[in-house]
Image (cartoon, rainbow, N blue to C red):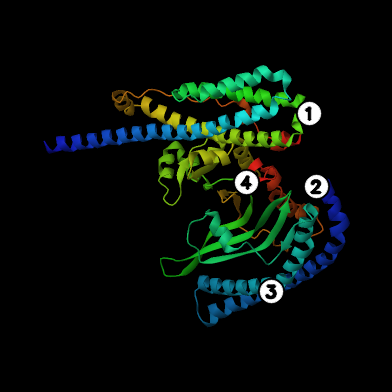
């Protein structure tokens, strides 16, 4: 009888440990997502200024600028789910990347001090977003591993925890960032 | 950084005439030391015979005592004779190489980094009893404030039989420079000895490291193989350790072939490269008139001065300009 209670006690301890570990991983993902959300918001706040300073120069990119504005409005809605935010961020990153490449065709814009400042700030925010994405991916990987590996997957099943989506890190973020090149063109 | 060919030219054109004079000094010292060694060898034999036949000591004990006493005497003579040469070597070789690589840098052969710089780096948390160093190089490289020196930090301890001994906490090159990004929290990168031996099993043990921040798992397999990272903020640690920087840290580790410790504290980067010898001291037995010997010092100093360009510390982010 005594052995039975000891075994039961050990099993209960393991269950409590796994439960707490899953809760801590879930919270970690949420915390990091909140951090990511904060830097994404910094970028959304920068977009109106950026659009305002480039639109009079970049007459041929009107469509892109309108799309960026629309994406920003969409992203600022409060009721978005995390995977929708991830999808919007991906689209917006690619649009902004395209816009920065298009800047090359506008020499007067490249000489504009205000634009250069905005471009520099944007680049800095992009670096912060990249770091937050990587931290988020790592926490989601830890979480996904925990909910799929035995025996914690059993507890995760009872807790109705679902697999979370990771960000696809764009290939250009894996390349060396050439800041000098960015500013001295 | 200037090309190797021009370093060879510089060596033969600017350093060689002075080194020829210094080489004469070296040869005189070597000759004196050879004579001393010969004399001390004879003395060791006499001491041995005396101890063994006159004082009836066991052969092994007599040999050890005579050998030890004459060896200590030789080391005393060696230090006395080579001290002046070592200073001249630093003036004519080390300082010249530094000024060739970057004329704006200052070299102080007797000075070293202040203790508070070492403490602020948070690289070595162990209490220490002796802090010493030499060969401080400081100045601005591409506008980035830089300091590095040869550093030796030790701890006193007692052996089982009560003998007092000194243990190295760190011995090697210590580098500090302004980092190109602003950050609020600290990140420490340490050599990962355990992971290479135990694999992923050790990550749990690493996460238990008291005194350090959270264990940061990074998305670069090679970097993770060499290093273990502790930080206070999961996002900011990755903001500092970008893919590009991790790649460059791995390159520096492979290039130096030594244990590398890095930390990012108060918008500064601290790098400690572990060497178990005095790095800027001359080797008396090697001729100064051979470039291959001088080349070792050139390569070491180039590597240190090149860290700014290698890590692109001069390419500051907007808010740090």
Horizontal side of residue B184 vs A55, given as left or right: left
Q: In this rendering, which labeled residue sits more in front, label 3 or label 1?
A: 1
Q: Label 1 belongs to which residue?
A: A107
Residue drawn at 57 percent across, 41 percent down = B240
Q: What percent of the width, then of the height, locates residue B136?
A: 68, 61
Q: Secondary structure at mark 4?
A: loop
Cα gap from disc 3 to disc 4, whole angstroms: 33 Å
Which residue is denoted by mark 4 in the rendering? B257
Callout 2: chain: B
Circle 3: element type: helix
Left or right: B262, with B105 as reference point? left
Marks 1 & 2 on one chain: no
Q: Nearer the viewer, mark 3 or mark 2?
A: 2
Asked if the residue at tag 1 contacts the one at tag 3, i.e. Cβ–Cβ closer than 8 Å, the answer is no
Q: Chain of mark 1?
A: A
Q: Secondary structure at mark 1?
A: helix
Q: Which residue is mark 3?
A: B80
Hey, which quadrant is residue B51 in on the image?
A: bottom right
Tell me which numbered mark, 4 or 2, is placed earlier along the sequence: 2
Find residue B147 and report its horizontal and vertical position in percent: 66, 56
- Quadrant occupied by the N terminus of chain A: top left
Sequence order check: which comes first, mark 3 or mark 2? 2
The numbered disc on residue B269 is none
Of labels 3 and 4, earlier in sequence is 3
Q: CA distance from mark 3 to mark 1?
A: 68 Å
Count neighbours of disc 3 (C-alpha within 10 A) and say few if under 14, some if 14 to 19, many if 20 or more.
few
Residue of label 2: B2
A13 or A97: nearer the viewer: A97
Q: Indicate left or right for A56 with B170 as reference.
A: right
């Amino acid at each position: 009888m005594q052995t039975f209670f000891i075994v039961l006690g050990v099993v209960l301890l393991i269950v409590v440990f796994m439960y707490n570990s899953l809760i801590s991983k879930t919270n970690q993902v949420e915390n990091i997502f909140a951090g990511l959300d904060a830097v994404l918001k910094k970028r959304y706040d920068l977009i109106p200024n950026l659009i305002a300073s480039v639109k009079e120069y970049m007459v041929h990119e009107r469509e892109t600028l309108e799309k960026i504005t629309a994406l920003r409005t969409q992203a600022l809605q409060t009721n978005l789910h995390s995977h929708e935010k991830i999808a919007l961020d991906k689209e917006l990153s690619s649009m902004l990347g395209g816009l920065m490449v298009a800047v090359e065709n506008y020499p007067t814009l490249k000489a504009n001090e205000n634009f250069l400042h905005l471009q520099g700030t944007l680049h800095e925010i992009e670096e912060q977003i990249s770091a937050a994405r990587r931290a988020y991916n790592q926490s989601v990987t830890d979480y996904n591993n925990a909910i799929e590996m035995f025996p914690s997957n059993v507890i995760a099943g009872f807790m109705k925890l679902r697999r979370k989506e990771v960000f696809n890190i764009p290939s250009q973020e894996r390349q060396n960032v050439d800041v000098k090149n960015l500013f001295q063109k | 950084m200037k090309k190797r060919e021009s370093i060879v030219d510089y060596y033969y054109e600017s350093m060689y005439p002075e080194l020829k004079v210094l080489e004469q000094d070296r040869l005189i010292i070597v000759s004196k030391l050879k004579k001393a060694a010969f004399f001390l060898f004879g003395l060791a034999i006499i001491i041995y015979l005396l101890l063994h036949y006159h004082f009836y000591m066991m052969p092994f004990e007599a040999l050890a005592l005579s050998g030890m006493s004459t060896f200590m005497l030789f080391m005393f003579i060696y230090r006395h004779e080579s001290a002046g040469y070592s200073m001249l070597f630093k003036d004519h070789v080390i300082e010249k190489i530094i000024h060739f690589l970057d004329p704006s840098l200052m070299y102080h052969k007797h000075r070293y980094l202040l203790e508070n710089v070492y403490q602020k780096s948070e690289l070595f948390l162990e209490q220490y009893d002796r802090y010493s160093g030499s060969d401080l190089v400081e100045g601005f490289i591409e506008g980035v404030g830089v300091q590095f020196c040869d550093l030796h930090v030790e701890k006193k301890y007692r052996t089982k039989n009560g003998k007092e001994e000194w243990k190295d906490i760190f011995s090697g090159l210590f580098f500090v420079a302004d980092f190109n990004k602003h950050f609020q929290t600290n990140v420490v990168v340490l050599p990962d000895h355990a992971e290479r031996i135990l694999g992923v099993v050790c990550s749990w043990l690493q996460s238990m490291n008291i005194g350090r921040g959270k264990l940061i798992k990074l998305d670069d397999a090679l970097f993770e193989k060499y290093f273990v990272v502790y930080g206070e903020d999961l996002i900011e640690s990755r903001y500092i350790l970008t893919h590009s920087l991790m790649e460059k840290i791995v390159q520096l580790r492979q290039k130096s072939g030594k244990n590398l410790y890095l930390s990012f504290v108060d918008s500064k980067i601290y790098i400690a490269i572990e060497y178990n010898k005095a790095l800027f001291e001359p080797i008396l037995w090697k001729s100064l008139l051979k470039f291959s010997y001088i080349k070792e010092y050139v390569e070491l100093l180039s590597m240190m001065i090149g860290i700014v360009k290698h890590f692109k510390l001069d390419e500051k982010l907007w808010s740090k300009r």
